[in-house]
Amino acid sequence: MKFLCVACDEAMKLVDTGEVSPGDAFTAVFRCPRCGARTALLANPWETQLVRSLGVSLGGRAAPHEPLELVRDRLVESRLLWTGEAERRLERVPEFVRPMVRDSVERHARERGCREVTCEVMDEVRSQMGM
Amino acid sequence: MKTYHDIAGDGGSDIVGQVAGREARLRVRMTSIAHSLAIVSGKGGVGKSTVTANLAAALAMLGHRVGVLDADLNGPCMARMLGVQGRALKLGADGVEPALGPLGVKLASMDLLLPHTAAPVEWHAPAPGHSHAWRGAIEAAALGEFLADTAWGELDFLLIDLPPGPERLDGLHGVLPRCDGLIAVTIPSQVAQLTVQRSIALARRLNARLLGVVENMSSYLCPHCGAIQRLFPAEAGVQRAVLGVPVLANIPFDPQLARCCDEGVPLVLAHQAAPAGRAFMGLAERVGARCSAREECP
């Protein structure tokens, strides 16, 4: 989408985005570089969803792309991804307690808002358990 | 007053740039894949995923490096058929590491991301009651992510198992930078052939290369007398003249197929000498030959 300042016949520039908690709708503010006039785009939920479904962030990305980022972000229920190193470390745990350890680590990771399970997350769980 | 095309750039929202970046990532990923083949069907229930799993295993038995993308995001079953259900995708240095099935067949599937086998694919959405307005967009983006973010490595064949329906081919065409061939799966019923004709017509309109048709359930072997019997009326058989493409294989029905799918072992591995096993091996040889023939053409 593009915004045009009709008075100046000048393309407006994005200056601010109001991003958006889940269930919300996004806003974006554009400014005319010539006269300084501002206009706000207030998207409805459908438009917000369509932009999110493209896996893009208004105004550009703040961080590099992560593997399966869109799918992992947008799925209501998904597994946490483990790094190869963390998975190998889990495999060193005796088999009969491995599912329990996996559950504990993933619960901790989710509580912390981690996007994946790394060795650092495993260390945190271990120190919490006093091991 | 200026129009949309008079204005360069998008004023800083960078949506087009991000979509282009994703497409560029996918193009780079595809450079290590020699042949990407889409497996399509006109309607569900013709055994498309069974054919995909067995073709993947048969190509691997011929010494090829094979990957499978389960593009049926809402009804994934390839993990079960390739014996890797319950395994998780792992993060590696080059992306998500696919699960390894029989003979090293690599698999990426939504199934491997869902927390349990009965979990439905549900998306967070501020407009959940109107999913018809956005579901196509998120599924196309998700398909692109699975293709681009999976560390496929060097592959001779990537098989893309599409959900049923001719329109799925159009969706894939919009995502994939290149598709080297299509294999259409059908059964010898006139209803199935009616719908597969639509897929073939659409493929032609998209200038996609049709390798041919696989006729699944073409016959069955009587377990008592060993005679080959028809499952469908003779006049319902795949008509090459009607479809206008070669028939790559006629796969006989084999009750062991269902058991093999449930156990996660492709039939062609467990029963290579059975008529269905031989048919899958023949299919793999013909697919390999048709792809090689294309390489030799200027």
Image (cartoon, coloured by chain):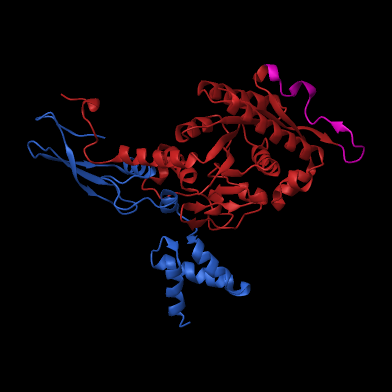
Position of B140 compared to B278: left or right?
left
Residue B186 visible? The answer is no
Q: The chain shown in red is which?
A: B
- Quarter in which the C terminus of chain B is drawn: top right
Position of B247 compared to B93: left or right?
right
**Magenta residues: mostly which secondary structure?**
loop
Seen at 41% across and 68% down, the residue is: A111
Q: Position of residue B196 (x, y in %)?
A: 62, 26
Seen at 63% across and 26% down, the residue is: B293
Q: Position of residue B234 (x, y in %)?
A: 79, 23
Position of A67 compared to B47: left or right?
left
Q: Is residue A2 magenta?
A: no
What are the residue bounds of the magenta stretch? B222-241
Seen at 61% across and 23% down, the residue is: B197
Task: Name the residue at the right extreme.
Answer: B225
Position of B252 compared to B242: left or right?
right
Residue B151 visible? The answer is yes
- Quarter in which the N terminus of chain B is drawn: top left
Quadrant in the picture for residue B231: top right
Q: Colour of chain A?
A: blue
Task: Name the residue at the top extreme.
Answer: B241
Quadrant in the picture for residue B250: top right
Q: Position of residue B100 (x, y in %)?
A: 61, 53
In the image, residue B229 above or below residue B263: above
Q: Position of residue B88 (x, y in %)?
A: 55, 57
Question: Which is more toward the observer, B257 or B233?
Answer: B257
